[in-house]
Amino acid sequence: MTRIFSGITPSGHLTLGNYLGALRQWVAAEHSPSDALFCVVDLHALTVEHDPARLRRLTRQNATLFLAAGLDPRRCTLFVQSHVAEHTRLSYLLECTATDGELRRMIQYREKAAKAEAAGQGVRLSLLTYPVLMAADILAYAADEVPVGEDQRQHVELTRDLAVRFNQRYGHTFTVPKATLPTVGARVMDLQDPTSKMGKSSENTAGIVYLLDEPAVITKKVMRAVTDSGEGGVVYDRATRPGVANLLDVLAACTGGDPEKLAEGYAQYGPLKRDVAEAVVELLRPLRERHAGLAADPGEVERVLREGAERARAIARPVVDRAYEAIGLLAP
Ligand code: TYM
């Protein structure tokens, strides 16, 4: 059976990008014969400036959204990273496998470090080792597949490299995982700045559709999305018309169509935007409705997370114990 692992960092409210790039794939995976674990990776949220009370709130809210998106705790394991000590236990062994050079080459590290420096904040050491902890998340569960959006591809590649290197040096210990990306929606762009990714920690919220935005707010954000002059009609070209291409991608991801073919059905941007807004509102409607019910019962979410952590521990512990032995540490 295929083992699947993926996670989301509780660094902000979840966005349409998180849903189309990751969450929606997770829900689909749950219905194929697989053994899946999904995690709110709270330790990763500590790698940049954070507020403790907000982190607790977002961790709970992200977990609630996992359920609201349709993940069923009877078919998969849902848990919080810091509840399972195996992640940090394994991370140290992988820090002894990775090199400083390969971590400094990570695109996200370079972007986030530059941002922290520009804001006059120190760059936390954990920001550099972040992809190693991510590799530990994946390898501790012997995951075969990691459903993620485009921006995490490089981190999964590093995970593969570390698994292969460890196996070559110390004997076969880890399953070498692969990233799985959706065909459309793997990189949803910011509606106000379509050359940047729609990110949950971006400051300009006008360009971001949050999963819990009211329908009227979603419509307003989509109708105000940045496009070009519109001369020459509606065409799909990511390089020269990133704003329109993004809208077509989102429409395709919501309706299951092909962005280039969808473009042929429009002569102007107005009707395209209206259809995108409607498709997004409809896509997120069931999630919003389920979230309202779940938020009223926080005890249920806590129970799911407690049981999930137990199941996760039982899977990860023997894998991490084997790695400790393989690398030469004396069993206690
Ligand atoms: P994070 O929290 O930034 O994003 C969670 C997931 O959402 C995807 N995603 C997007 N997909 C399409 N368009 C976008 N605009 C967009 N923004 C985000 C991400 O690709 C991701 O799949 N490092 C990870 C969390 C992590 C993880 C792991 C993932 C930690 N350990 C182990 C998989 C396996 C992160 O910060 O994702």
Image (spheres, grey):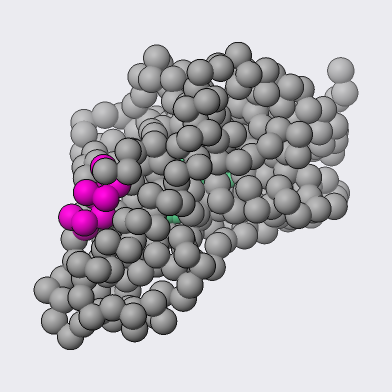
Q: Is residue 159 left or right of residue 329?
A: left
The front one of 109 and 60 is 60
**Part of the protein shown in magenta:** 217-225
Quick check: 223 above or below 284? below
x 64%, y 39%: residue: 71
Q: Does the magenta stretch include residue 219?
A: yes
x 53%, y 57%: residue: 153
User: Residue 158: image x %, image y %?
Assistant: 59, 53
Total labels: the figure holds: 0
Residue 268 seen in this snapshot: yes
Examine the image and state in which quarter residue 203 appears.
top left
Residue 9 seen in this snapshot: no
User: Residue 148: image x %, image y %?
Assistant: 55, 53
User: Residue 156: image x %, image y %?
Assistant: 59, 53
x 47%, y 65%: residue: 255
The front one of 291 and 193 is 291
Q: Is residue 92 magenta?
A: no
Q: In this view, does 156 lie to the left or right of 258?
A: right
